[in-house]
Amino acid sequence: MSITYLEAIREAQYEALRHDPAVFLYGQDISTFGGAFKATKNLDKEFPGRVFDAPISEDAMVGMAIGAAVEGARPIVEMQFADFSSVGFNQIVNQAATLYWRTNTPCPITIRLPSGGTAGSGPFHSQSMEAIYAHYPGLVIVTPATVEDAYWMLLDSVAIDDPVIYCEHKFLYYHLKADQIGGRELPIGKARIARPGRHATIVTYSAMVHEALRAAEELQLDGYQIEVVDLRSVKPMDTDTILASVARTGRLLALGEAFPWGGVTAEIVSRVASEAFHLLDAPPMRLNSKDTPIPYHPNLWKAHRPTVSTIAAALRRLLRY
Amino acid sequence: MSLAETIQHSGTGQEADFRPRFLSAYQHMLLARVLEEKLGALYRAGGRIVGGVYVGKGQEAYSAALGVQLQKGKDIYGPLIRDQAGRIAYGEPILDAVRTYLGALTGPMRGRDGNIHRGRPQEGLMAMISHLGSMLSVVAGALFARRLAGRLGDAIGATSIGDGGTSTGSFHEAMNMAAVEKLPIIVSVANNQFAYSTPNNRQFACENLVDRAAGYGVEGVTVDATDLGACLEVFQQAAKRARAGGGPQMIVGRLLRLAGHGEHDDASYIPDTAKKGLGARDCLAVAEQRLLDDGWLNAAEVKEMYAEARRKVDQAVSKVSKEPLPDPFKENWQALSSADLVEGQHEA
């Protein structure tokens, strides 16, 4: 018996609905159809009147969730694809993110963003939006990379009294499996050492954690021990764990699947450079996707995002310095 | 009532409570006008009010007529920029307005937001953001949650928008969603002919904005928004239908904005033809005339009402002027309610 990353997301929503009558689900095709990815499969049957199909209106979906939260509800909004959250952008960053600060009114909404690329998904079904939302004050941005985190961090997100952008990676939906979901290990805001090492640190999150681990395996053949830090949440970012890792290794590669201009990897490098410059034995490096829209054909898509081989090549450059 | 029926006659006054409702709404209008004149004067004098002052001159009747239909503590209200009269009618104390304009720490926004961007969401008064159309789905969501929790009862929600705001995607999405969910919400559209400086013919191409009601599958009514009696009737009927399960009610009021977009704007773009049109009547003067004509008040009583409103406003301004202003060194610079999730300050 095993459970996938996607099933963990469904199970977490099941548990959230079971645990708290204030929770309801709102999104396109999520009711009887069970969602485009089946992340809400059967939840409508199990919790009648708590799972609602929304019109194709991301702005109104988020606005509705905000109003519901003001009245004490704890809605989970499913964006069909993270990319479409751009249509609800205004409500997320201007309404949800400012509500508490402006009016002292908590805004406990969770917005699920099926994120990141899969082969054949093209420019508008592949985006990673975490940096965009992390830029705005008033939002919590989580990016689970494991089955356990997919489960526990979704439950934690629903329990948080602030708007949470839950970035779930579509590439992990079916491939990533665990024998079972263990106990909660870390709270949101704490990073995890996914692999200990002493020659260089990769700081990454979401699906790139797994690519980083494979690249670290490859470097081990050359005798290098690469530490991999899984951020888990990009905001808050666990700077202490990053700095402690860099203190051990002296070398940093910030890795992300998102576009290269600014963003999470730039934030990591900036924090390390400004707070731990003296710990560095080499200039900090970044590796991101290419600075183009995300291509459709697998040949192009595979070359657009960081891969095990480009990560390994970057590590070798970092280690040679 | 048929879709898009136009009510342009004044209230008949047949209902027993018409006169007290009219009088009460008139007093809210008058207080709003006096308050906004004071805020405008403070702004023009310089120093006390930063940012701007946005007044509802000419829209008081339309705004107050909706506000008096709502019961604070029960109904949800999402006012917009020109709803001072509706806010007063709903029960927002004028101190909230003065404190927010002056940025006082004692106000609901504590200097974090200003002017008309204020409210008390947990008490049913939503605090508008500047992005037009975006409050409609929020009010709808509050109603949705109450219905889901089984505690909606016959409460309703109401929100306002202008002719320009109806052009946003946000407005369309929310209107459609509210209709799909058949939520008890009044959507009050004030067509004051200009969105900032943009006239109706550059804003929309339909004959009358109320035509859109049919497209959303909701009830739609047009009213002469300079006529308090007509506005009271229209909103009373709309509230009744909404409370009875009739779903969203779209009301379109025809009027003219009798001021600039804000006090910084001389509105020189409004042509004389518009200023001479029917919508350009001052609703406050029209209501006053009716009160005098019908013998409900005499000139001395009206005068005393103005004096009373000025006393209230002066008292509020004087009180707030002595109240503490926000202090950057004491400010809690945290945007999250979850203190454990706030990041440390990382100087990059």
Image: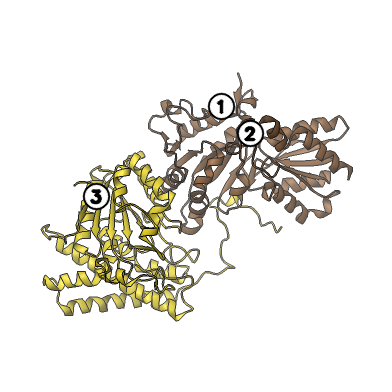
User: What is the distance, in whole Å, between disc 1 and disc 2 at their CAs?
Assistant: 27 Å
- The kind of residue tagged 3 is Ala
Q: Is residue A155 above or below residue B57?
A: above
Percent across and percent down for residue B134 are: 43, 52
**Residue under pointer 2:** A296
Residue at 46 percent of width and 25 percent of height: A42
Q: Which chain is brown?
A: A
| Residue A249 image position (x, y, % from top left) | 83, 43
Quarter where residue A251 is shown: top right
Circle 1: residue type: Glu
Discs 1 and 2 lie in a common subunit: yes
Q: Give the residue number, with chain letter if any, for mark 3.
A: B4
Q: Is residue A166 left or right of residue B35?
A: right
Tell me where residue A128 sits by quadrant. top right
Compare residues A180 and A165 and report the one nearer the observer: A165
Front residue of this view, candidates B221 and B103: B221
Q: Amino acid at mark 2?
A: Tyr
User: Which residue in the rendered view is the most extreme toward the top?
Assistant: A1
Image point (53%, 32%), residue name? A12
Which element carries disc 1, helix, strand or loop? helix
Q: Which mark is residue A7?
A: 1
Q: Nearer the viewer, residue A123 or B347?
A: A123
B242 left or right, relative to A120: left
Which chain letter matches label 1?
A
